[in-house]
Amino acid sequence: MSISTPNAISTPNTSPTITTDALIIGFGKGGKTLAAKLSAAGRKVVVAEASADMYGGTCINIGCLPSKSLILSAEQARRDGANSTPETREAAFEAAIKEKRRVTSMLRDKNYHKLADQDNITVITGRAHFTGPHSVEIATAEGPVAVTASKIFINTGATPRIPDIPGIHTTPGVYTSTGLMDLDDMPQRLVIIGSGFIGLEFASMFADFGTEVTVLQHNAEFLPREDADVAAAIRAQLEAQGVKFLFNADTKAIAPAADGGVRLSVAVKGMTRGASQACDSTPAGTGNAHTDITGATDTTTTTSPTSNPTDHATMSHVQTKPSDDGEPRFAEPAEARFCLTTDAVLVATGRTPNVEGLHLEAAGVELTERGAVKVDELLRTTAADIWALGDVNGGPQHTYISLDDYRVVWSQLNGSDRPYTVKDRKHVPSSTFLATPYSRVGLNEREAKAAGLDYVVKRLPVAAVPKAQVMRRPDGLMKAIVERNTGRILGAMLLSVESHEVINIVKLAMDLDAPASTLRDMVFTHPTIAEALNDLFA
């Protein structure tokens, strides 16, 4: 059942109160799966969700599935040539947004009814906060609802991390991933602050739609946690799509532009022509002048030698402020200041656990130094009979980890002799859905070397895979790390079409402690991308 008004549970003018076996705060993957399981076991469950737009959780509403819907639509637009003219681009984007909204609306409705239609489950729409160790108040549109529960499960997910940049909260045209996926009109120019995998997925997607994309990265190294050869291949793929990169770039301020777009003041370290003036001190109209920053004396890599970000976001250079003796003087390292003008800005600087307003202190629930709910290997918080599942507990931010968190919690509630713990979790894979998907599991070469392991590196160009040629998708590389004496698979990195499917085969082999020879000698169907594992592990 669902609660839309207090009268559903009490008389008017009386604050409704519910006593239940379990309260789940948040409708995410782990929480909704646990709710259904508890209900099937005969337990009374209340599920509190802050927004009716989030039934089912982040993944189906503002995360994995809507973004993949748009990515597939963008790939189709690129293949069909629909990204070639302004008119066809707009039509393709409009159709993609319409389809994305259809999919998310359908999934949200199914997820809602999957729980709300059960007699043992009450779904309440409203923001919850703790009032005591086992008591919560839910602020609904019709008034507060008090809930007392024997067991409470926090499943509130994560929210975009917004850096402290002047103007970032008040300037129209600045979006998180949530807002950017729901635009009615396609931006012709897009600047992305942050070059993590979320930002790169959006860069690839919008480039396929025909948007001119510029990515700003704070430091000098692209994908610093990945192996250099893999990172270089990913960057080359994105640049082939038209994505421009500007490294060592700090956004100092954001403001509305005169043309109705967005203006960013960006400082680039490592350039010998510097600036000390703010972007808003430049003469009117200079934001529309192109300046080739790749010609500046540069002590670090800022752009591809063949790319110029000014081809996308419009740049104007701010004049250097002279020193007291009248000569230009630069701080170490040297820094140049530019104004970038664009139609839209995506802030993709990571996500942080969503604990604001929960009043966790009222229940005795502590946080980690990074702001996540502190949990042990059983996902128990510092308060008795309160658990935390999913992104809010600081673990890997994947929907399938939230699902696995459900397994950890359920193993404690179903009478198991030995509960399943986070420490039992093996080899978490990941996939980034670029034009050529990148998937990995286990250690890369950088990590294996740091760990002092004796290993061999296996490599295979995707162009050598027959199915990739048949699909006309020969770009990318496959790489695996194998322990030299044991044949143990330490990790794999697949920049390849269908890598998001193939990586699960490698994970399964690693989970079963199968040596590399197992994949080398496995009989696969043909032609498939999976059969490339025969050659990769040869």
Image: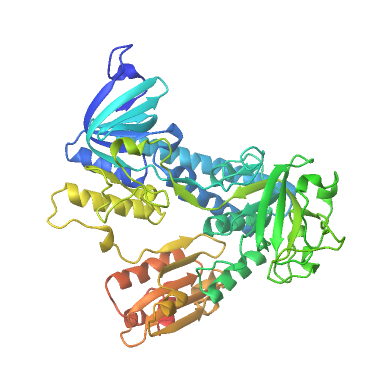
Tell me the residue at 60%/53% (across/down).
74
* Quadrant location, the C terminus: bottom left
Q: Is residue 6 left or right of residue 256?
A: left
Residue in front for this viewpoint, 386 or 501: 386
Q: Residue furthest front?
A: 324
* Quadrant location, the N terminus: top left
Residue in front for this viewpoint, 193 or 190: 193
Q: What's the colour scheme? A: rainbow
Residue 523 visible at all? no
**Residue 389: where, in percent of width, then height?**
32, 48
Residue 180 visible at all? yes
Q: Is residue 79 left or right of residue 414?
A: right
Quadrant in the rendering for residue 354: top left
Residue in front for this viewpoint, 455 or 100: 455
Q: Residue furthest bottom?
A: 485
Tell me the residue at 42%/54% (across/down).
397
Tell me the residue at 79%/41% (across/down).
259
Task: Give the answer, above or below, for where 382 lies relative to 42.
Answer: below
How many numbered markers are drawn?
0
**Residue 365: where, in percent of width, then height?**
31, 42
Q: Is residue 338 left or right of residue 452?
A: right
Task: Give the answer, above or below, for where 253 lies relative to 81.
Answer: above
**Residue 361: where, in percent of width, then height?**
33, 38
Tell me the residue at 24%/53% (across/down).
378
Q: Is residue 373 left or right of residue 257?
A: left
**Residue 332: where, in percent of width, then height?**
70, 66
